Structure formats: structure tokens, C-alpha cells
């Protein structure tokens, strides 16, 4: 009898095992002024430091123009006004003069040259910001509800998100040695062989790991799309504890049925003092049972899908010594942000500003980047980045509102956010020309496509409706397309998949409606189904719910709770 051979580990696993400090030859390449790029091995190590090596794909016909994308890590998307000004300055000095808000409440700096990389990283850290674990096979930025006044629990949950972010961060000394001290890690081979991160071990995680907090009924973080999520349960106006959800994730690969989007399962309830233990246990289950032989199959969602909730709960309780209670009742009713001016519970105000596709930049007549800088350096509000790629200016005194309105207006920015409801609910990933995984346009294509869609909605009498629209340049789903009412997923240059049927609360996956559509065919397909929606919808029924009921025969779709 021939014994089955063990599956071969991926290349990434060998890299991590051979250099658990995650230092590679990054410091040496930084010191080599003749090198225009980092090695393929260092490309992987750089991710753990919050950096992606990219090239401008618009220029590939004449050669590769290498540059770096740097991603911050802001738990809950919170940063001070002073920190924002540092980010704004670095984007102008070393980046492409834009700041990109991610769907995980971070900033991305695009277009950073290798010669400016260390200066960028040092300046961020001097302003008490970090990029460690913003990418790589580790726990990424911890998301949390950023909006004041939506719940009395917001500040408490944000504090716990910050604590958990620190707890889950890798402890390699390479980060500060390379970027702050500017030195190589001259370690003996035995030191490399014996180092192990106290939480992650020598080989870290099989793939990335995403964590989020949510406070019902607002699901502004799309919590069910995370590897682990903590749903805050309030009783008597106080935080009673959390319902744990686990096993969510949206990434997939075209043509590979073994990969798929998945919403997290509800595991059980626990009280707040057990948060750290539970979070570590979920992470280490991924560490110990995740697939290290196939990176496309390496997310925690596949562990849950294959082993089941009961097994997962038992493993979790064994690791923590905690008996989970049955999940407490909760309901999400919507996602998205509060935009415009709103009063906080302490008498101050916050302002929510729509940032199309998260890109803070100046354009003709709409000098968003300059206007925000002027307002923040004048009034110094706290800044919060939202999971929908928008920006909040928080803790504004009542006497400052008029001055902020006037200063923003000077730069063409209205605090009333005068855009259609559908545009306000839209998101896109960066895609081309910077993302190496992009198969089609996204950020550069969605604004024009939305303009066409807005005209169609007006023609059909739907101009006042909100349709949640998301676009992504590849199936990895960075703009969280698979919970949207309408999603465009890049499949090839100028070709997309059209998904329909997500819901307002981001608690239902949509489904593939049409495959391989050219960009100029998308609107015609939407016209057909939107016309049917106008003719056949129930009173108060949203478009996503109509699609689930009529196109997918989903009998679980509830009747509309309110009129449109």
C-alpha cells in the first residue's frame, strides 16, 4: 500500500519559517541606492510592515515603474487632528498627493518611492501612528463603529478595539529596528531559528485575519464579513457583553468553486472580561487549523465551513476555559454612515463628509484635500475614518460650526453632501493602475457608471431611492461587493460579473446574475431588472430584497418594515 504524501507547504510558509523576524533583506535594499525595487521574498515580508510593492500598470508598455503603497493601522478609524495633518503632509511630500480611506478604516499612501519610504515610515511613527500588521498573515486593523451619538456604547467599544489591536499585534523587533532606528537586524542563525512570536509562533497565520466590533442595530462595519466579530449587547444602557461571530470572509477566485464568499456564524455570548481570551482563541484556531498548503483555501471561513459551528465552539471553550452562553437576541437594520451635522450626547457636534471611493484629493472646483487640511489645522477636531470610506470630524464645539461651514464652502465643499442617495451608498476598491491583482477598472470607472445609473433611476422614478452599489476590480472583494444590492466584480479587462440581491443591513449575500458583461452592457442589464422592480415590487420593498425574492426565490426575505 502506498502511503499518501503530505501536502507541500506554500512558499510563504517557508519564508516565514526561515525568517520569523520578518526582516528579510529590507534594510539592505533600503541602503542600496542602486536598487529600484525589493526582491520577491521581501515583497512578502514588506506586507507585515504595512507596505505593498507595486508598479504603475498604466506605464508597463514602456517598463515597470516601481513604487510603494503604505497602509496605516487606526483601530476604529480614530486619529487626532494633528495626526491627520501629518498624514496629509506625507501624502503631498512623498505620495501622489492623495489620501485613500480604506474599507477597514485606514489610510493608504500611494506612489511612495523607495528612496522616501523610510522617511515616510519614521514620520508616521513619530506622530504615534503605526503601519505594522496593516497587511500580511496577521490580524489586520480592528474595526469598530466610529460614529458618536449612535449609541452610548461607542466610546467603550472603541477603547476595547484599541486594546485588542495592541494585543493582536505581532511582536517582532524588526519593525522598529528597520524603520525607526534605520539598522539591520544582524542576528546569528540560531537567533532566527529560535525566535517565535508569543501569539503567532514562528510562521504566523495561514492568511490574513480580520476583526470587527458592531453595535446593533447599525451594521456599519459589515461585521459578518470578518473572520471574527463582536456584536455588542446592551442591557440597561450598559455593555452586558458580546455575541461572538466567526468565519466570515468575501475573497474568492474566478473559476474555483472551492473558494466562495461566506457570512460569519453566530457562536455564542460572553461577558466583556473575556474579550481578550476569546479573541486570542479564535485567532489561534485559525493559526493551528488553517490551510497552509493552499493560500486560496487558507482563511478561517473554510475551517468553519468544513468543521462546523459545534466543533468550533468546543475548540474555543477548551482553549479559553470559558463556557459560552447562548447568543443574546440582536438585529441589524442598516449599514452606512450618518452624514452632515449631528449633535453628540455631550453637546458637541460631528460632521460626516462623503468621500467618493475614499479618495481625498483636489479637483477643479472641489478642493477636498486642501479644504479638509484648512479646517483641521484651524479647528483641530478629532478625525474618524468610516468603513464606508467616509470621514467624520468629531468633537466640534457649537460655536465652531459656522466657521467650518464657511471654510469648507470656500473650497467647494458642502456640508449637506449634495449627492444622490445611491452615490452616497457606493464604494469601490482602487484597482488599476496600482493594484497588481486588478483584472478590471473600479475606482476610476464607478463614478461615471453611477452618473449613468442615476439618469436611469430618474427615468424610472427611482431617483430618491437608495441602492447600495459596490465595485471591485477582482473577485477578492476589498470593497465588500458580495453584500451589496448591486455589485460589479472585475473578471477581465473591460469585463464584469453582475451580482444582485444583498440587503440594507449587510446580513445577506447577493448572487451572480450575469457573467462576462462588458462595461457598456452593465446599464442595459440593470435597466431590465430595475424596470421589473418598478412594476412588481411590494410597497416599501428595497431593490435588494426584491431581487432575492423574485430572482432567487428566497422565501426568508421579510416584508418591508417601513415605506421608502
Image (spheres, rainbow, N blue to C red):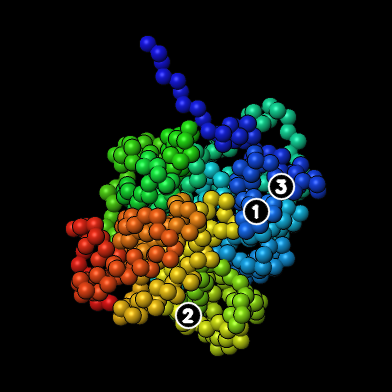
Task: Give how far apart the Cα atoms at labels 3 and 2 are.
Answer: 41 Å
Camera-near label (2 vs 1) is 1
Q: Residue at x 76, y 54 (%)?
A: 115
Occupied quadrant, residue 459: bottom left
- Left or right of 556? Residue 334 is right
Instruction: Return the mark for residue 417.
Output: 2
Q: Could you tell me residue 90's position as x and y percent?
A: 69, 64
> Which of marks 2 and 3 precedes in the sequence?
3
Instruction: Return the mark for residue 294.
Output: none
The answer to whether residue 498 is visible is yes
- Left or right of 202? Residue 236 is left
Q: Does 157 sit above or below residue 453?
A: above
Element at label 2: loop
Q: Could you tell me residue 501's position as x and y percent?
A: 30, 61
Q: Give the quarter of the figure containing the C terminus.
A: bottom left
Q: Label 1 belongs to which residue?
A: 60
Task: Give how far apart the Cα atoms at labels 1 and 3 are.
Answer: 15 Å
The answer to whether residue 333 is visible is no
- Left or right of 401? Residue 185 is right
Task: Give how far apart the Cα atoms at labels 2 and 1 are.
Answer: 38 Å
Element at label 1: helix
Q: Does 407 sit above or below residue 190?
A: below
> Which of marks 1 and 2 precedes in the sequence?
1
Amino acid at each position: 500500500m502506498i502511503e499518501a504524501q503530505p501536502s507541500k507547504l506554500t512558499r510563504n510558509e517557508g519564508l516565514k519559517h526561515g525568517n520569523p523576524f520578518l526582516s528579510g533583506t529590507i534594510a539592505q535594499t533600503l541602503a542600496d541606492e542602486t536598487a529600484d525595487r525589493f526582491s520577491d521574498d521581501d515583497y512578502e515580508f514588506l506586507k507585515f510592515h504595512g507596505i505593498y510593492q507595486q508598479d504603475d500598470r498604466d506605464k508597463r508598455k514602456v517598463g515597470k515603474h516601481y513604487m510603494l503603497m503604505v497602509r496605516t493601522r487606526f483601530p476604529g478609524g480614530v486619529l487626532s487632528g494633528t495626526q491627520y495633518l501629518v498624514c496629509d503632509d506625507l501624502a503631498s511630500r512623498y505620495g501622489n498627493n492623495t489620501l485613500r480611506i480604506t474599507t477597514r478604516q485606514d489610510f493608504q499612501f500611494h506612489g511612495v518611492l523607495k528612496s522616501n519610504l523610510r522617511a515616510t515610515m519614521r514620520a508616521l511613527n513619530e506622530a504615534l501612528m503605526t503601519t505594522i500588521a496593516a497587511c500580511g498573515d496577521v490580524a489586520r486593523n480592528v474595526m469598530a463603529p466610529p460614529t458618536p451619538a449612535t449609541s452610548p456604547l461607542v466610546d467603550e467599544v472603541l477603547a476595547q478595539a484599541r486594546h485588542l489591536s495592541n494585543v493582536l499585534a505581532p511582536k517582532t523587533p524588526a519593525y522598529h529596528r528597520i524603520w525607526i532606528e534605520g539598522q539591520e537586524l544582524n542576528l546569528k542563525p540560531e537567533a532566527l531559528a529560535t525566535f517565535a512570536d508569543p501569539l503567532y509562533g514562528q510562521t504566523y497565520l495561514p492568511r490574513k485575519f480580520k476583526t470587527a466590533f458592531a453595535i446593533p442595530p447599525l451594521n456599519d462595519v459589515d461585521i459578518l464579513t470578518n473572520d471574527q466579530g463582536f456584536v455588542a449587547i446592551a442591557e440597561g444602557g450598559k455593555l452586558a457583553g458580546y455575541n461572538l461571530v466567526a468565519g466570515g470572509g468575501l475573497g474568492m477566485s474566478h473559476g474555483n468553486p472551492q473558494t466562495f464568499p461566506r457570512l460569519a456564524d453566530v457562536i455564542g455570548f460572553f461577558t466583556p472580561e473575556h474579550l481578550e481570551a476569546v479573541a486570542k482563541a479564535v485567532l489561534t484556531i485559525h493559526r493551528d487549523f488553517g490551510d497552509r498548503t493552499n493560500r486560496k483555501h487558507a482563511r478561517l471561513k473554510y475551517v468553519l465551513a468544513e468543521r462546523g459551528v459545534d466543533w468550533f465552539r468546543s475548540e474555543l471553550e477548551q482553549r479559553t476555559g470559558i463556557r459560552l452562553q447562548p447568543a443574546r437576541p440582536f438585529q441589524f437594520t442598516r449599514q452606512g454612515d450618518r452624514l452632515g451635522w449631528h449633535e453628540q450626547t455631550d453637546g458637541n457636534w460631528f460632521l460626516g463628509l462623503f468621500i467618493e471611493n475614499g479618495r481625498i484629493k483636489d479637483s477643479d472646483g472641489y478642493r477636498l484635500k486642501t479644504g479638509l487640511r484648512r479646517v483641521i489645522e484651524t479647528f483641530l477636531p478629532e478625525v474618524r475614518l468610516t468603513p464606508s470610506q467616509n470621514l467624520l470630524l468629531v468633537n466640534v464645539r457649537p460655536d465652531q460650526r459656522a466657521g467650518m461651514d464657511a471654510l469648507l464652502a470656500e473650497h467647494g465643499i458642502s456640508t449637506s453632501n449634495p449627492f444622490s442617495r445611491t452615490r452616497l451608498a457606493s464604494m469601490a476598491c482602487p484597482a488599476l493602475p496600482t493594484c497588481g491583482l486588478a483584472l478590471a477598472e473600479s475606482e476610476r470607472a464607478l463614478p461615471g457608471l453611477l452618473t449613468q445609473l442615476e439618469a436611469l433611476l430618474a427615468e424610472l422614478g427611482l431617483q430618491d431611492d437608495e441602492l447600495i452599489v459596490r465595485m471591485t476590480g477582482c473577485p477578492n472583494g476589498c470593497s465588500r461587493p458580495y453584500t451589496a444590492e448591486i455589485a460589479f466584480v472585475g473578471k477581465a479587462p473591460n469585463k464584469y460579473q453582475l451580482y444582485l440581491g444583498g440587503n440594507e443591513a449587510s446580513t445577506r449575500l447577493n448572487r451572480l446574475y450575469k457573467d462576462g458583461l462588458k462595461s457598456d452592457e452593465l446599464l442595459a442589464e440593470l435597466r431590465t431588472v430595475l424596470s421589473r422592480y418598478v412594476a412588481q415590487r411590494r410597497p416599501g420593498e428595497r431593490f435588494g430584497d426584491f431581487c432575492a425574492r423574485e430572482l432567487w426565490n428566497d422565501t426568508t426575505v421579510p416584508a418591508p418594515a417601513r415605506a421608502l
